[in-house]
Image (cartoon, rainbow, N blue to C red):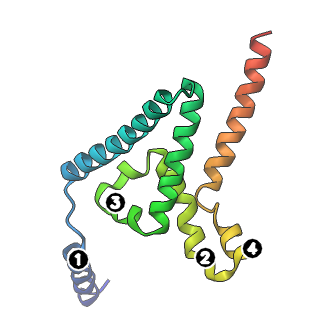
C-alpha cells in the first residue's frame, strides 16, 4: 500500500469519526427506561380501568393488549410514534406498541405500491419472523405440555 493510499484511508477514518453522531449511553438508557415504563404504566391504567368497569382480570388483559396495539398503530400512522422512538430508542421497541409500529410502518411506507403487493406483502416484513417464531414455539410448547401433563 502506498503512502498516498494510507493518507487517504486515514482521512476517510478521520472524516467518518467526525461525522458520527455523538451518543450518550447513560442518557439513552434513562430515556428508554422512562418511556418504556410510561408505556407500561399506560397499559396498567387501561387494565385497571377495564377491571373497574367489571371486566374480569383475564379479559381486561386482552382488552389492554388490543388498546395498546391500537394506540401504537394510530400514533405510527400520524407520525408521532417515530418521534417518540427517536428520543426513547429501545423503550418504544420492547412494549407491545413497538409490535404495532413494526407492522404499521412498512404498510405506510409501501402503500404507494398498492394494497396487495405494497401494504399486504410488506406489512409483515419486520413482524413476520416474530410471528412465525412465536406461533412455532407455542405449538412446540403446547405439544410438550400435552405429553408431559398426561
**Vertical placement of residue 44 versus 98, above or below:** above
Mark 1 lies on a secondary structure that is: helix
Gap between marks 4 and 3 measured at Cα: 30 Å
Gap between marks 2 and 3 measured at Cα: 22 Å
| Quadrant of the rendering where the C terminus is positioned | top right
**Residue at far bottom of view:** 4
Callout in the foreground (1, 3): 3
Residue occupying the point 46% across, 28% down: 52
Give the image quarter of residue 111.
Answer: bottom right
Mark 4 lies on a secondary structure that is: helix
Categorize mark 2 by other alpha carbons within 10 Å: few (<14), some (14-19), many (20+). some
Q: Dot 2 corresponds to which residue?
A: 110
**Vertical placement of residue 97 versus 76, above or below:** above
Q: Indicate the position of residue 101 as horizontal and vertical percent values.
A: 50, 58
- The first of marks 4 and 2 along the sequence is 2
Q: Dot 3 corresponds to which residue?
A: 84
- Left or right position of 148 against 133: right
- The first of marks 2 and 3 along the sequence is 3
Mark 3 lies on a secondary structure that is: helix
Residue occupying the point 62% across, 82% down: 112
- The first of marks 4 and 3 along the sequence is 3
Give the image quarter of residue 56.
Answer: top right
| Marks 4 and 3 in Cβ contact (< 8 Å) | no
Q: Indicate the position of residue 6 as horizontal and vertical percent values.
A: 25, 82
- Left or right position of 135 against 48: right
Callout in the foreground (1, 2): 2
Q: Dot 1 corresponds to which residue?
A: 19
Give the image quarter of residue 11.
Answer: bottom left
Callout in the foreground (1, 4): 4
Gap between marks 4 and 2 measured at Cα: 10 Å
**Disc marking residue 116:** 4
Amino acid at each position: 500500500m502506498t503512502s498516498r493510499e494510507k493518507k487517504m484511508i486515514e482521512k476517510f477514518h478521520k472524516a467518518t469519526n467526525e461525522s458520527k453522531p455523538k451518543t450518550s449511553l447513560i442518557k439513552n438508557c434513562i430515556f428508554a427506561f422512562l418511556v418504556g415504563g410510561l408505556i407500561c404504566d399506560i397499559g396498567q391504567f387501561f387494565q385497571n380501568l377495564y377491571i373497574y368497569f367489571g371486566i374480569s382480570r383475564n379479559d381486561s388483559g386482552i382488552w389492554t393488549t388490543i388498546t395498546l396495539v391500537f394506540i401504537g398503530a394510530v400514533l405510527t400512522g400520524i407520525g408521532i410514534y417515530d418521534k417518540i422512538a427517536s428520543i426513547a430508542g429501545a423503550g418504544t421497541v420492547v412494549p407491545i406498541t413497538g409490535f404495532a409500529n413494526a407492522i404499521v410502518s412498512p404498510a405506510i411506507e409501501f402503500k404507494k405500491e398498492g394494497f396487495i403487493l405494497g401494504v399486504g406483502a410488506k406489512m409483515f416484513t419486520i413482524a413476520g419472523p416474530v410471528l412465525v417464531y412465536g406461533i412455532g414455539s407455542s405449538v412446540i410448547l403446547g405439544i410438550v405440555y400435552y405429553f408431559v401433563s398426561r
